[in-house]
Image (spheres, helix red, strand yellow):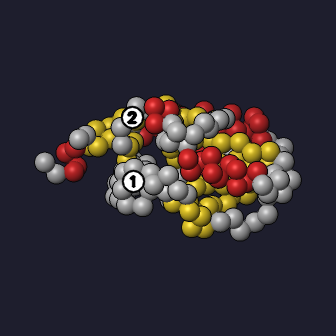
């Protein structure tokens, strides 16, 4: 059986779009007058973040970090490496971290601690998806699109060994 036939849609693009619109309304309400820095965690967040920022109608800045804890496998190594750090100061700035999926929580918790040391005015987390069944480290998600089952998700920026990011829906790979 080839990999395409093993894909099963979990959230079609219309449902993803509706979740993003809801998140954008919540974020707009909270950040309208704060000129936040939105920090996306690469690579998986790029599709979600692009769609999200296009719906935010207030001044903001966009920044990216690249962290690694997976390598080419499906399981986290448990160690987070900063591949690409921040290129702008965030001291006394309102920061909104944007993540595609919170799984074990290790990567997000690492980043939130890293950012806190730089003394932002505030820091919050927006995640498209949360997989609480795999959580190893507690994480507070302020803006959440979906809670998802313990399946390996791909599409809409999410990958499996750099494949499937371009799929318009969020799907899972059947075993």
Residue 116 visible to the viewer: yes
Residue of label 2: 150
N-terminal of the pair, mark 1 or mark 2, is: 2
Going by the picture, which residue comes out furthest to the left? 1
Q: Nearer the viewer, residue 80 or 143?
A: 80
Left/right of residue 19 with respect to residue 158 in the rendered view: right
Which mark, by number, is residue 104?
none
Instruction: Please identify, in this view, whether the residue under mark 1 or under mark 2 is nearer the observer.
Output: 2
Residue at (60% x, 68% y) in the render? 84
Residue 15 percent location from the top left of the image: 45, 33
Q: Does any portion of residue 21 appear in the rendered image?
A: no
Q: Is residue 164 above or below residue 12?
A: below
Q: Residues within 10 Å of mark 1 (few under 14, many from 20)?
A: some
Q: Quadrant of the C terminus?
A: top left
Which residue is tagged 1?
A: 159
Foreground: 30 or 131? 131
Residue 134: image location, x then y, percent: 46, 36
Which residue is located at x 58 percent, y 55 percent?
41
Q: 134 or 131: which is nearer to us?
A: 134
Determine the secondary structure under disc 1. Answer: loop
User: Secondary structure under badge 2?
Assistant: loop
Percent x, y of residue 72: 37, 60
Seen at 79% across and 48% down, the residue is: 94
């Amino acid at each position: 059986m080839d990999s395409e036939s093993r894909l099963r849609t979990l959230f079609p693009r219309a449902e993803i779009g509706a979740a993003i619109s809801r998140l954008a309304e919540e974020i707009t309400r909270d950040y309208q007058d704060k000129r936040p820095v939105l920090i996306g965690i690469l690579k998986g967040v790029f599709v979600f973040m692009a769609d999200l920022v296009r719906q935010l109608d207030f001044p903001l800045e966009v920044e990216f970090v690249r962290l690694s804890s997976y390598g080419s496998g499906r399981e986290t190594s448990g160690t987070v490496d900063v591949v690409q750090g921040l290129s702008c100061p965030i001291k006394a700035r309102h920061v909104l971290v944007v993540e595609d999926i919170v799984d074990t929580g290790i990567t997000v918790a690492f980043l939130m601690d890293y950012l806190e040391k730089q003394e932002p005015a505030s820091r919050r987390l927006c995640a498209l998806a949360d997989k609480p069944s795999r959580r190893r480290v507690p994480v507070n998600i302020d803006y959440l699109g979906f809670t998802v089952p313990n399946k390996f998700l791909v599409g809409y920026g999410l990958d499996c060994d750099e494949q499937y990011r371009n799929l318009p829906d969020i799907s899972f790979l059947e075993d």
